Structures are given as C-alpha cells and as structure tokens.
Amino acid sequence: MFSLLRSLNVLLLPFLVALLPSLASGQQYEGETIPNSLPSVPGSELAYIKITDPKGSGSNLTLTNYISHNSAGDRVDGSSTKRAVIVIHGAERDPGTYMSNLLSALSQVPNSDVDFDSVAICAPYFPNRNDKTTGYPWDHLPKHAANLIAGHSLDGQFVNRYAAVGTELGLTTPISYWIGNPNSFVWFTTDRPLDDSDCSEYDVWRDGFTNYIEINTYGDAIVEAGRDAVLARYNSRSIAYGRGVQDLGDTSSTCAPGTTGGNRNERFFNFIKAFPPSCPNPGVVGPCSTIDYVQAGHDASVMFASSAGQDRLFLDNFNGTGDIAFDFGYPRRQTGDDPYPNSALNGTASTGPTVYYAGNMSYYGCFTDQDPRSLTYTAYSSISNTIGLCTSTCNDAGYTIAGMEYGSECYCGAPLT
C-alpha cells in the first residue's frame, strides 16, 4: 500500500510545503471540483487545490484536501495564522479521520493563543484505484513561525522517508517532522541489527537505498551523493518521534522490516540506537529532535491528543522564539533515547514495586529471538499460559530464564552472554 501512495506523496508534499507561505484565499482553491463521497468533517471543508504538473504535461491537476476553518467557521485568515500542520493519512486513506483527530487535539490545547484562528490544518487525500467511488467518478501567511509535517503509522513511514530524501525548499520558516509509530524506518547503512541472510530485498527502497536511483527520480541527487549525505540531511531536520509504548504490532508485507526488529517497538529502539537523534542547540536556529513516550497503542487520535502530541503539533516554537518542550515520558527506556532531556525528571526510576516470580525472576523486557532459539527448551504450549506458570515451570526444570511468545508458548533457558 505504501508504494501506491509514495509516488503521489513524494511529488506533492514539497508543493504543499512550499504553498504554506502563500495559501491565497482564491488561488489555492482554483483546482477542479472532483465529485466524491468523502465525509464532511465539522470545523473544516473540502478544498480543491490546483497543482502544477511536475512533468509539465498537464495544466489542471487537482489535489483534494481537508482544510480547517477558523473559529467563525470560515476559511483561515492568513493575517492571524501562525502555524500550519500538514497531516498525512495512513493506509486506510481516511484524511477526514486525521482532520477530525487533529481538530479534537487542537481544541484541547491549554493555551488560549493556540486555537482555530492561529493554526491551519491541511489533510491531503491520496486516493488509489480502490477509491473510484469515494475520491473521484490562502491570502499570504506571513506570520508563520513554524510549520510541521505529521504522519502516523503508514505515513509515519512516509514522513521518515521524506525527511531523508526530501528536497531542501529554501524556506525561512522552519519545518518540523512528526513521526508516530511507523511500522518501519529507512536504514542509512547496509548492515542490520538482525539476520538478513534470508531476505535478499532487505536493503531495497523503501527499507534501504540499493535500488533507489533505478526506480525514483525525486531525491536522486542526494542519494547519488551517498548514504552519509542522506543521513546528514536527515540529521539536519528537527524530528519529533512519538512512540506509543503499548504498540507492539507488526503489519509488514515483506521480510525487510524484520531485519531491524520483530515489531514496531523493537524497530524504533534499534533505529535510534543505530542513528541517535540529537538536539545540540535547543532554542536557537538549528535542528532539535525529540523522543516522546505516550501511553498508547497504535492509535493516532490518542497520540495527537496527548500532552506530547499537543506540544509537538501545535505549541513548540509557536511564537518563533525557539522554545520547545523537553522529551516526554519518564523513565527513559534506552541509552541515547533522551535527545532533549528534562533535567528535573532525567533520573526518574520506574514506578511501582518490582514483581518477583519463581526463582526470583522479574520482568526484563521484550526481545526478538532468532533461529536457533536463545531459550533452547520449549516447556509447553497452552492457552492457559501465564507469567506465573511459565516462570514456575522453568524454575522447576532448573532454568533461570523464562520467555513467553504468542501468549501461549513458554520457553526456558540459562543465562545469556
């Protein structure tokens, strides 16, 4: 599904970003009205933006978007708008849902200056062939202090890739990138943290760059310059990572993501370990990346409306003074996961008592195993499996480590090196 959206997204997103300083009240709505059955979203309207054909062969390309309204229910007024957020929908191709979620999150921001008059939200719609019955048959904004491109899930993947190969637009207004719970990340080196011997396509685009120039024209110059150049461009961006700590899912359609982790959670931690984010100069011109832990699963609405989501999407650098919030979510979980630490919380320990099981075992974490298994003894497979039963079984068999998988499997092993 990502590949179907990518060619449209990667060409049109630079246009949308460039359009932010000049969303003229008449001009940006000059596109052809496209008959559709997209749902109406209170607080916004469907707008048809005329797009210049990047190949120069067409004169009336149109992009359908949800555009937020101001507090009076009218189109946003550029004289009062200070921030624009472009949110990219995921695999369900439901920009209305994303617009609704962001409008809800914006309404909950505890700052009276940050509202529907000062923030403009754009949710573009990228249909595919399955949408033929659904999707087809501004004054200037000179006071913008910051703009943001946001993507969750599938389009968290897109924002990650766009931050890596996206063209430098030469805008004076800084752009931040919010990446929430992607299923995978593009990898900037040819090595992987897990075994790739059975995955010949582990480094092809969109997971790596081996064949990038063969299949793409956008971004080919930076990729031709080498992986170090691509990584340098990525590190030059201000990237806000949003990690739902309850999101342990995996929706991979190829083997490549599995070479970087067994699920979304592991892939995130392996990615930031390999390519550590940083915030060398907070509060001044220059990149500052952040990592926020949110008590959420794979749910964009919860991520957006969280305190971390509100700050990254709406509040950070709102007045152009460079002020951004510290990393959210303590205690931290891994060395190097605190690019902009909150010194008041940086030493925070886990809350709540440690639970001890048979043999004095306690919870240690979630890990990816390989073949052959690190925990060599299969104790049982039972729908009645529990942590207590598994640890007790392993302890009784003389093992010091117990592991569970799929909720029903129990494995035992000796100390690992």
Image (cartoon, rainbow, N blue to C red):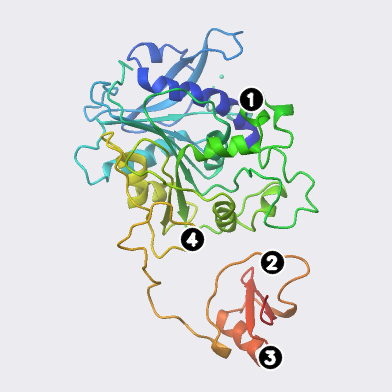
Question: Residue 132's x, y, as percent?
Answer: 59, 25
Q: Quadrant of residue 103?
A: top left
Q: Residues within 10 Å of mark 2 (few under 14, many from 20)?
A: few
Residue highlighted by disc 1: 221
Looking at the image, residue 201 lies above or below residue 218: below
Labels 1, 4: front one:
1
Q: Which residue is mark 4?
A: 246
For marks 1 and 4, the one nearer the N-term is 1
Residue corresponding to mark 2: 369
Of mark 2 and mark 3, the one earlier in the sequence is: 2
- Mark toward the start of the polypeptide (3 vs 4): 4
What kind of residue is marked 2? Asp
Which residue is drawn at the image coordinates 32% and 42% (left, top)?
A: 283
User: Pointer 4: residues within 10 angstroms few (<14), some, or many (20+)?
Assistant: some
Badge 1 amino acid: Ala
Q: Residues within 10 Å of mark 3 (few under 14, many from 20)?
A: few
The N terminus: image quadrant: top right
Front residue (pair 97, 370)? 370
Residue 400 at least partly seen = yes
Q: In x, y percent, where is residue 212?
A: 70, 32
Amino acid, disc 3: Gly
- Report whether 340 appears left or right of 382: left
The label on residue 398 is 3
Secondary structure under badge 2?
A: loop
Query: Circles 2 and 4: CB distance less than 8 Å?
Result: no
Q: Residue furthest front?
A: 280
Foreground residue among 383 and 207: 207
Q: Is residue 72 above or below residue 293?
A: above
Q: 278 or 394, which lies in front?
A: 278
Are the two marked residues, 3 and 4, in contact with CB atoms closer than 8 angstroms? no
Tag nearer the camera, 1 or 2 = 1
